[in-house]
Image: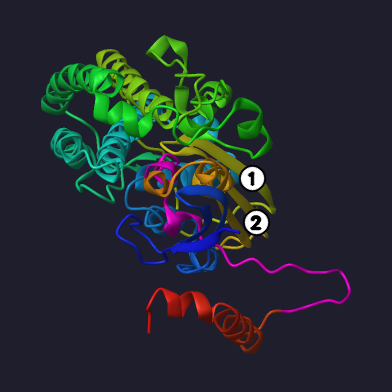
Amino acid sequence: MGMYVPIGPYHPALKEPITIKIKVEGEKIVDADIELGYNHRGIEKLLESKLWISVPFISEHICGICSGVHQMTAIMGIERIFDMEDKIPERARMLRIVGLELERIHSHLLWLGVAAHESGFDTIFMYTWRDRESILDLLEMQGGRRVVYSIGKVGGVRRDVDDKFIRKAKETMNYIKKRAQEYMKAFEEDPTLLARFKNVALLPYDVAVNLGAVGPTARASGIDYDVRWEDRYFGYSEEIGLRVAVRKEGDALAKALVRLDEIIISAEIIENVLENLPAGPIELKFPPLKTPAPGEAVARSEAPRGELIYYYRSDGKRTPYRVKVRTPTMANILSAGYMVRGGYIADVPVAFATIDPCIACMERCIIVDDGKQVRKLDWAKLKHYANKWFNENWHWIKEERIY
């Protein structure tokens, strides 16, 4: 017969509000359903009210872990709208890559710690987060801040780097590569980590393709795809050490090892870029009130969690007519629901953590039109839908003792 067990929206294993309804027979999970919609912030509508030059500052507040790639992708799209992408100075492009790869390392170290914590291995959590501090120090040196560092700007980057930064970055990358090798050995040999990660949260290749998985989640299932390699934006290429980390096992262990591989690759990219950093200006002047021609632009990048997409539509005014953001978690959430099925209740935190979820990034307000009539959503109707959802789900809320 089975029974349903709600996990969330507020639960020790979930750092953000989301509900995973699992159907269990004994300890075995036979079905799972993920409910979204607890944390919608209206970011896209806010972006549409800002000057073009101000959009990246707002966009980097979408996520506190990958703020840099949100900002850089927003900038990339704006530079395409204004037809200035090919005019960005080469030194600025390379410094953008340094910032993005530093962010990838800190994001993956953060994830490794959280994943280990969810499995009960807090020692790894403390070690990875200690090492992550050295990366945040570099981000602070490059951008001025440790969370929302604002390295980029429309037309280039805000600040240049000096010899002190380059010297410290090279030393830190050498240290991080050694630490990543040690973590890799721990995940491949430690019996506790193997018991919690190997053959857990399986995502076969064909399922990952059908569900549209992206990033390390997809590459751990054998999908050889990385936007940095496909699009070569900002100057990414094999000449600076770029290669794609792929594993075929498709389990939680493979997802951890892919991210560890990427930490090493990112460290090598940073070393190569700083060793051959071109001279020259770091920005192209951009008038704050400049208006573009009417048109559209799409920018995409490889965020630490996977493919990030920004869509812009211009009507020739000082603010965007439409901004659409598709985040990696939105692409991977269906895979998370699949990976939970067939496992045990104790595996849910690890399985869900394998996609490195960012719920605040993902949440959207979605209205489905049945085609029968034209509908315009106003405040009264939005309130009606909210009350309707609350009444339909009251029994779940009562069971979770949220009053």
Image point (69%, 69%), residue name: 367
Q: Is residue 8 left or right of residue 139?
A: right
Q: Does the CB distance between marks 1 and 2 fall below 8 Å?
A: yes
Q: Is residue 281 visible?
A: no
- Say which label, 1 or 2, has the lower sequence index: 1
Q: Is residue 177 left or right of residue 243?
A: left
Image point (41%, 56%), residue name: 62
Q: Amino acid at mark 1?
A: Ala
Q: Tell me which corner region of the image, top left, top right, bottom left or bottom right, holds residue 143.
A: top left
> What stretch of residues is rendered in magenta?
350-376
Q: Secondary structure at mark 2?
A: strand
Does the magenta segment cover residue 372?
yes
Q: How is the image coloured?
A: rainbow
Q: Position of residue 193 (x, y in %)?
A: 28, 30
User: Which residue occupies the foreground of this view, 230 or 84?
Assistant: 230
Q: Residues within 10 Å of mark 2 (few under 14, many from 20)?
A: many
Q: Is residue 149 above or below residue 213?
A: below
Q: Amino acid at mark 2?
A: Ser
| Numbered tag placed on residue 375 in the rendering | none
Q: Which residue is mark 2?
A: 314
| Numbered tag placed on residue 297 in the rendering | 1
